[in-house]
Image: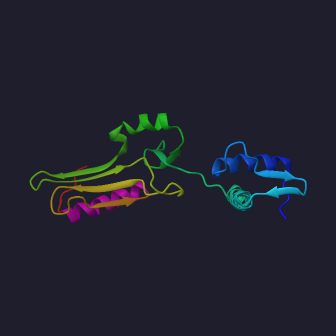
């Protein structure tokens, strides 16, 4: 037997009418001389509603994660710092020089290797997402990319990708 408060009854009735094809104006619980009659659709709907309430209670009780999408570099210009202020993040992202880790170009072979701070995370729940990316433009390694979590890893990875792309002399 499911025990429902008046508030549960009202909440269920609203949910049921919105999620079931019951004609408008028909009560989900009909009272007769023999007592309360519950439509079969109402019983099935009540089971679905109770399952939904249990699921929602579990979700509410689950640990909450802080979603971190937008990042800038801290005062040292090298350490990622999460931000929730999208307006200041947008302004900060306009400064390409602040985001550039390294750029090497081989003009003879028409190959460039660029490493930048992305400023946006695709791994929103990580405290240390891969926010730096090295990308090869031109040459046989065109499109090759690597991602890193720190500025130091990005610098080291940049040098390795330059060697892979055939850029011998590194100019920063």
Which of the 4 image quadrants contains residue 34?
A: bottom right
Q: Which residues are magenta?
A: 150-165
Q: How is this picture coloured?
A: rainbow
- 16 or 8, which is in the foreground? 16
Membership of 93 in magenta stretch: no
Q: Quadrant of the N terminus?
A: bottom right
* x then y, percent, for residue 123: 48, 57
Horizontal side of residue 115 vs 165, given as left or right: right
Left or right of 36? Residue 167 is left
Residue 95: where, in percent of width, then height? Answer: 36, 37
Q: Left or right: where does residue 161 sit relative to residue 20? A: left
Main secondary structure found in the magenta portion = helix
Tally the numbered discs: 0
Question: Farthest residue in the left direction?
Answer: 108
Residue 159 is a magenta residue: yes
Residue at x-position 49% and y-position 38%: 86
Residue 13 percent across, percent down from the top left: 74, 48
Q: Nearer the viewer, residue 168 or 116?
A: 116
Q: In the rendered image of this protein, does residue 71 appear above or below residue 50? A: above
Q: Residue furthest front?
A: 33
**Nearest to the observer: residue 156 or residue 135:** 135
Q: Residue at x 36, y 44 (%)?
A: 99
């Amino acid at each position: 037997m499911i025990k429902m408060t008046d508030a549960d009854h009202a909440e269920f009735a609203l949910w049921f009418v919105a999620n079931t094809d019951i004609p408008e104006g028909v009560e989900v619980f009909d009272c007769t001389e023999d007592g309360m009659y519950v439509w079969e659709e109402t019983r099935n709907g009540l089971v679905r509603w109770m399952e939904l309430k249990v699921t929602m209670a579990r979700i509410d009780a689950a640990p909450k994660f802080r979603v971190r999408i937008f990042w800038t570099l801290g005062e040292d210009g090298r350490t990622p710092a999460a931000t929730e202020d999208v307006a200041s993040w947008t302004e900060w992202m306009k400064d390409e020089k602040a985001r550039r880790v390294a750029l090497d170009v081989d003009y003879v072979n028409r190959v460039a290797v660029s490493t930048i701070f992305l400023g946006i995370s695709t791994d929103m729940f990580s405290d240390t997402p891969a926010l730096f990316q090295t990308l090869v433009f031109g040459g046989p390694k065109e499109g090759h990319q690597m991602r890193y979590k720190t500025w130091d890893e990005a610098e080291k990875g940049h040098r390795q990708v330059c060697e892979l792309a055939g850029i011998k002399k590194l100019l920063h």
